[in-house]
Image (cartoon, rainbow, N blue to C red):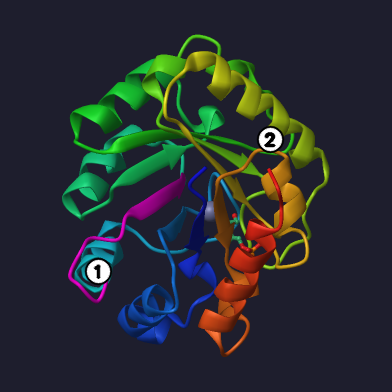
């Protein structure tokens, strides 16, 4: 199984965002996780399409290959802003079912805009929202904290939800990424991987220590030993 580390720039230095993105990619990041908050759906306010557009040219490997920008929308409503993020260079766009009145339409809109659609599940949100749209999602994001802030503690019930989501993905036969977001650290990433996650968002764990490469290396070492 391909396992990806997705640093969340929420914990980066926003005054030096381009440099932070380049540094974390040089340190081994596979995906750039881009948290969008609107002070309405969640009680915090971050960045929008203009900042995504500004980050895009920095999200490249040393060889010049695009590193995917994974836009996690914590905004309500969602549809109006989706084409703007697609134009700003987003690769994946995920949203919370509570933030859209028409789940199927929003997933279709993201696809029409040329991006990969994802659905995000808060700790209290059931996976049943997937029942009729498994053929339309490319990413399932399990929140292991309540959204809004970095640096919170991992909520253990996310492990059960990851196992259930992994079973749904296997049953679908589709190549759907299973991402986890919130409180992911070097000391719990192996257990989270064993529950079925393949894409690991980490904000404070990576940007909170000066040596990004050392943290990412330690995470990969844990993943290699996870045995799942
Ligand atoms: C929370 C965000 C997360 C956040 C994770 O609403 O969606 O992506 O940055 O931060 P850590 O890894 O510090 O829990
Ligand atoms: Zn996020």
Instruction: Tell me: 137 left or right of 115.
Output: right
| Residue at x 44% of width, y 58% of height | 33
Query: Looking at the magenta stretch, what is its main secondary structure?
Result: loop
Q: Residue at x 45, y 27 (%)?
A: 100
Residue 63 is a magenta residue: yes
Residue 178 appears in the figure: yes
Q: In this picture, which residue range is highlighted in magenta?
A: 61-73
Identify the disc placed on residue 60.
1
Residue 144 appears in the figure: no
Q: Is disc 2's CB within 8 Å of ligand 2?
A: no
Counting from the top left corner in percent of width and height, residue 82 is at: 28, 40
Is the residue 125 above or below the residue 210 in the image? above
Q: Which quadrant does the C terminus fall into?
A: top right
Q: Describe residue 99's horizontal placement relative to residue 105 as left or right.
A: right
Res. 194 mark? none
Residue at the (47%, 83%) spot, across then down: 13
Count of numbered badges drawn on the protein? 2
- At mark 1, the secondary structure is loop
Q: CA distance from mark 1 to mark 2?
A: 30 Å
Determine which residue is flagged by label 2.
162
Using a 10 Å C-alpha cutoff, classify the residue at mark 1 as few (fewer than 14 neighbours), some (14 to 19) or many (20 or more).
some
């Amino acid at each position: 199984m391909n396992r990806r580390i997705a640093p969340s720039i929420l914990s980066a230095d926003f005054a030096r965002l381009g440099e932070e993105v380049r540094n974390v990619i040089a340190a081994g990041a596979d995906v750039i996780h881009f948290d969008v908050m609107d002070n309405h759906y969640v009680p915090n306010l971050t960045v929008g399409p203009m900042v995504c557009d500004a980050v895009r040219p920095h999200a490249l490997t040393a060889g010049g290959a695009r590193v995917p920008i994974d836009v996690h929308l914590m905004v309500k409503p969602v549809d109006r802003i989706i084409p703007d993020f697609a134009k700003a260079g987003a690769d994946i766009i995920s949203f919370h079912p509570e933030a859209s009145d028409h789940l199927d339409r929003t997933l279709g809109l993201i696809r029409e805009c040329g991006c990969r659609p994802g659905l995000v599940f808060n700790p209290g949100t059931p996976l049943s929202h997937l029942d009729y749209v498994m053929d339309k999602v490319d990413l399932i994001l399990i929140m292991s904290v309540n959204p809004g802030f970095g640096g919170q503690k991992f909520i253990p019930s996310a492990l059960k939800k990851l196992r259930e989501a992994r079973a749904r993905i296997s049953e679908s036969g589709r190549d759907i990424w299973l991402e986890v977001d919130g409180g992911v650290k070097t000391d719990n990433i192996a257990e989270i991987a064993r529950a079925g996650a393949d894409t690991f968002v980490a904000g404070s764990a990576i940007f909170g220590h000066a040596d990004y490469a050392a943290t990412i290396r330690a995470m990969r070492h844990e993943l290699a030993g996870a045995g799942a």
